[in-house]
Amino acid sequence: MISLPRLNLPACFFRIRRSAGVARIWDPLRGQWLVLTPEEWVRQHMIRYLIEKRGVEPHYIVQEYPVALGGMAQRADIVVMDKNGQPALLVECKAPEIPVSRQENRAVFDQAVRYNSVVGASYVVVTNGMEIECCRLNRETLRYTPSDELPDLSALYGV
C-alpha cells in the first residue's frame, strides 16, 4: 500500500495505481500518469485547491512552466494564467517534510522569487502541503508583501 501524508489542504480523491513497483497518480490536466513523489502529491492537491476553492479555471493552469535563468532551463511547478494569457500566480511546491516558511527556509522563497523574476506573476506561493505562504509583488517597489491567504482568482476571468 502507498503511504502518503495527510496535507493541510482539502481532501481529494485521486486515481493512484502501482505499476512495475512504482506508484503513479493520474493528472487529469495533462492526461497522463505521473510518478507519485511527495512533491507531486503536494502539486496535485494544490492544483485541485486552486480549481475548487480559489476560482481558477483548469485550462489556465500550466504545470512545469519553463523558466530560463542564467542560460539554465528551470521549471516553476505551477503557473496560473489570466484570461489574456499572462502569468498571475506562481506556485513552487515542495515535499511535506521540507519547511517552506521564510523564517525556516528562505531558500525556497528565494527560488520562487528567482523564477518569478522571469515569469512576472503578481502572486508567488510556496507550499509543502502543510503550510502555504503567499506574497504579492508590488510592481513599483519590486518587493513582496506577505498575504494572509491566496486571492480569489475567479476575478482573473471576469467571473
Image (cartoon, rainbow, N blue to C red):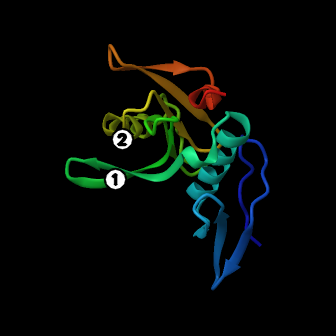
**Looking at the image, do the residues carrying marks 1 and 2 touch, with CB atoms under 8 Å apart?**
yes
Q: Could you tell me residue 120's position as x and y percent?
A: 37, 33
Q: Is residue 108 left or right of residue 71?
A: right
The residue carrying pointer 2 sits among few (fewer than 14), some (14 to 19) or many (20 or more) residues within 10 Å by Cα, namely many
Q: Could you tell me residue 113's position as x and y percent?
A: 37, 34
Given residues 87 and 64, the one toward you in this image is 87
- Asked if residue 148 is positioned above or below residue 123 in the image, the reply reads above
- Residue that numbered label 2 is attached to: 115
Residue in the picture at 64% in, 82% down? 21
Given residues 109 and 44, the one toward you in this image is 44
Question: Of marks 1 and 2, which one's residue comes earlier in the chain?
Answer: 1
The C terminus sits in image quarter: top right
Say what secondary structure mark 2 lies in: helix
Furthest toward the left, the residue is: 71
Q: What is the number of the mark on residue 107?
A: none
The N terminus sits in image quarter: bottom right
Q: CA distance from mark 1 to mark 2?
A: 8 Å
- Residue that numbered label 1 is attached to: 74
Furthest toward the top, the residue is: 140
Q: Could you tell me residue 46's position as x and y percent?
A: 63, 45
Say what secondary structure mark 1 lies in: strand
Q: Is residue 43 left or right of residue 146?
A: right
Q: Amino acid at mark 2?
A: Tyr
Q: How many marks?
A: 2
Q: Is residue 102 left or right of residue 32?
A: left
Q: Is residue 56 left or right of residue 88?
A: right
Residue in the picture at 48% in, 22% down? 136
Furthest toward the bottom, the residue is: 20
Residue in the picture at 60% in, 69% down? 32
Q: Amino acid at mark 1?
A: Gln
Residue in the picture at 79% in, 47% down? 11
